[in-house]
Amino acid sequence: MTSMRRIVLASRPEAEPGPENFRLEEAPLPEPAEGEALVRVRWLSLDPYMRGRMSAGPSYAAPVGIGETMTGQGVGEVIASRAEGLAAGDTVLGSFGWADHGCAPARELRKLDARLPPATALGVLGMPGFTGWVGLTEHGRPQPGETLVVAAATGPVGSMVGQLAKALGLRAVGIAGGEEKCRLATETFGFDACLDHRAHAEARSLRRALAEAAPDGIDIYFENVGGKVLEAVIPLMNDFGRIPLCGTIAWYSGDEGGPDRLPTLWRSVLVKRLSVRGFIVTDHWDRIGDFLAEVAPKVASGEIRYLEDVTEGLENAPDAFLKMLGGGNTGKTLVKLP
């Protein structure tokens, strides 16, 4: 084998991304240098943050260049190693991009526990699950008896947040797209209630439904969506409420629409003495060991549950990604490679 396949960014989207922004191509198979390992990727992670990397505007990380491999983490099998501690056959997690092979230094790879399904390192025990854990525990500061609201409740972040909140004695209210996802939120993940945002075209309608589901107000809003959900939640926040902020997927394509709500939002932050904390999960990697020590046994025992939305074939990654951005996935979005 002398070549590999990868998907590159063909062009930058002007608004909503489409298939034309991606290109599947072949590239020479890399050879590992001293201290590196060559990995055949088996599982590829697709995540909302990748939409931001497609744009050239300033952000917390550099954008993907035109003609460069789309960024992303993957899990795969070491097929050649020049790194101490890694041997052919080891299963590792690394940032290989949207590709069927990748080469990386050993310090950037994590050997996985063979007792757990390897794809869990990309979802419930990976960056999304860790985002939910660190955002809730460190920035949400939950207390028993409080009420938490999180959108995308059946996704890998939202479902982790909801399950952790319930275990800590909180009332957990989810928001999801569609009746089936709301059923999964309550029956699979244990939310006390879940609201279908598609049944509420306007923030005012969603707010009325939230007020019924959270009669004591909202103490923690785990923000990963923005848009009308944020607009619906803010008036229901209790004094000294906390808002951990890890994403605003409703605005990732630049269409914020509607009137300027910033004065209302800012006044609510003031008069209710809210704590709003934006965080990037990579700033907390020093705590990944604590997360795995606490959560991995709960995943293994079934105490923490998860769902995976699997698409097969690297060539189908763009369609799966676009489907996810539109809310068409159920659970963690993965691509399985042969």
Image: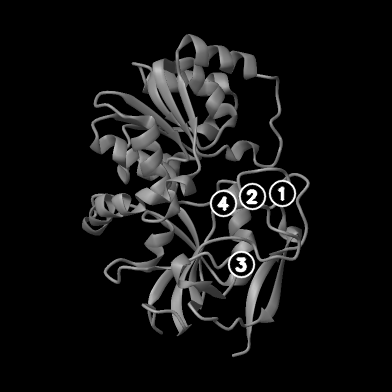
The tag earlier along the polypeptide, 4 or 2, is: 2
Q: Residue 128: image x %, image y %? A: 44, 50
Instruction: Tell me if 148 is positioned left or right of 178 in this view.
Output: left
Whole-number angstrom distance, CA of label 4 to CA of label 2:
11 Å
Tell me which colouring the rendered structure shows.
one colour
Label for residue 55?
A: 1
Label 3 vs label 1, nearer the camera: 1
The three-letter amino acid code for the residue at tag 4 is Met
Kindly state the secondary structure of the residue where label 1 is placed: loop
Q: Which residue is mark 3?
A: 316
Q: Residues within 10 Å of mark 4 (few under 14, many from 20)?
A: some
Label for residue 51?
A: 2
Q: Which residue is mark 4?
A: 324
Kindly state the secondary structure of the residue where label 2 is placed: helix
Q: Residue 155: image x %, image y %? A: 45, 47
Q: In terms of image quadrants, where is residue 266?
A: top right
Q: Residue at x 71, y 75 (%)?
A: 25
The three-letter amino acid code for the residue at tag 3 is Asn
The tag earlier along the polypeptide, 3 or 1, is: 1
The tag earlier along the polypeptide, 4 or 1, is: 1
Label 4 vs label 1, nearer the camera: 1
Q: Residue at x 45, y 39 (%)?
A: 179
Q: In terms of image quadrants, where is residue 18?
A: bottom right
User: Quick check: marks 2 and 1 in contact, CB under 8 Å?
Assistant: yes
User: Quick check: marks 2 and 3 in contact, CB under 8 Å?
Assistant: no
Compared with residue 45, is residue 305 higher up or lower down, i.e. above or below? above
